[in-house]
Image: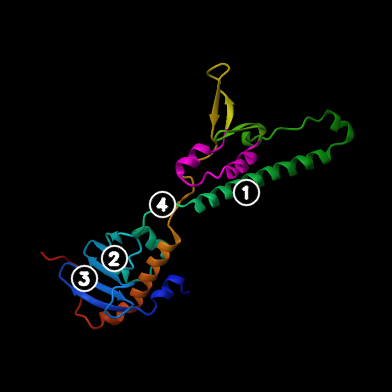
């Protein structure tokens, strides 16, 4: 399936710029004799460099440890992104990550409530008078005092805490999100009349890091077009040797 990025360079041609003993350079050119939208691909024995007017990132990109024989293969866009691009913070990724966590806890809460309702339905009238409503085994689903950034929630569960997280709009940076993550009050056994705050989430990864769609799209499009055109060019060349000069 052709992407919007590929369609913009689907009519490019592949030119041989230079075949040195150390580096081999090619150009995907959209307009004859012009550099607009041109992409230069430089292959060395230890790296691939993508530069030119259409260079994916502002300073171009490179993949260390890979060469021409690898790049001319059929490669998945996610795999290419791992080799050429660096992850960065994307607020939309973080929002999706924490939305999934919120939905997971909503599901666990609903399962608990359904189980509780089923138990109550099985009780007869006499048992119901003696019945004490059980408390969820999971402390996060027990009513507690939560701190979400500077907001304090009394008699709340993790579901309400996560819903508050979205109300505070704290996804613009990893630092802001980290400082706003919900934590609940817990008595500290070692110290009398002392409270600690427990954050029940893995803060090593907050779900906001990834590859920008446009960067992956351009990288995949450049690779796809090069892989399509290179066999025709290769047939006209002497065998290419990847070894550097002695």
Circle 2: element type: strand
Is residue 150 found left or right of 57 in the rendered image? right
Q: Residues within 10 Å of mark 1 (few under 14, many from 20)?
A: few
Closest to the camera, between mark 3 and mark 4, is 4
Circle 3: element type: strand
Q: In the rendered image, which residue does mark 1 sit on?
A: 103
Q: In the rendered image, which residue does mark 4 sit on?
A: 88
Magenta residue span: 157-183
- Residue 126, how many percent across, how many down? 88, 31
Instruction: Identify the residue at image location x=33%, y=74%.
Output: 226
Q: In the rendered image, which residue does mark 2 sit on?
A: 51
Could you say which quadrant of the image residue 199 lies in? top right
Q: In the rendered image, which residue does mark 3 sit on?
A: 24
- Residue 141, how many percent across, how many down? 65, 37
Residue 65, above or below 146: below
Circle 1: element type: helix
Indicate whether residue 199 is drawn in magenta.
Answer: no
68 or 137: nearer the viewer? 68
Instruction: Identify the residue at image location x=19%, y=74%.
Output: 18
Residue 20, above or below 181: below
Is residue 58 found left or right of 129 in the rendered image? left
């Amino acid at each position: 399936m052709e992407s919007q990025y590929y369609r913009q360079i689907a009519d490019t041609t592949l030119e041989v710029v230079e075949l040195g003993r150390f580096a081999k350079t090619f150009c995907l050119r959209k307009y004859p004799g012009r550099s607009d939208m041109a992409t230069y691909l430089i292959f060395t024995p230890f790296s691939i460099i993508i530069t030119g007017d259409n260079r994916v990132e502002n300073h171009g990109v490179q993949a260390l440890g890979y060469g021409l024989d690898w790049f001319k293969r059929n490669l998945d866009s996610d795999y290419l992104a791992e080799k050429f691009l660096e992850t960065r913070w994307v607020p939309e990724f973080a929002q999706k990550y924490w939305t999934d966590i919120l939905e997971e806890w909503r599901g666990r809460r609903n399962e608990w409530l359904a189980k509780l309702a089923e138990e109550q339905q099985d009780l007869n009238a006499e048992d119901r008078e003696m019945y004490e409503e059980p408390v969820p085994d999971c402390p996060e689903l027990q009513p507690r005092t939560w701190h979400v950034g500077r907001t304090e929630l009394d008699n709340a569960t993790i579901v309400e805490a996560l819903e508050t997280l979205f109300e505070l709009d704290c996804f613009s940076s990893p630092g802001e999100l980290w400082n706003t993550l919900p934590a609940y009050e817990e008595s500290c056994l070692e110290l009398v009349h002392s409270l600690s705050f427990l954050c029940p989430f893995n803060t090593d990864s907050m779900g906001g890091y990834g590859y920008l769609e446009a960067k992956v799209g351009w990288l995949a499009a450049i690779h796809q077009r090069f892989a399509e055109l290179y066999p025709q060019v290769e047939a006209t060349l002497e065998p290419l040797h990847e070894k550097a000069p002695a």
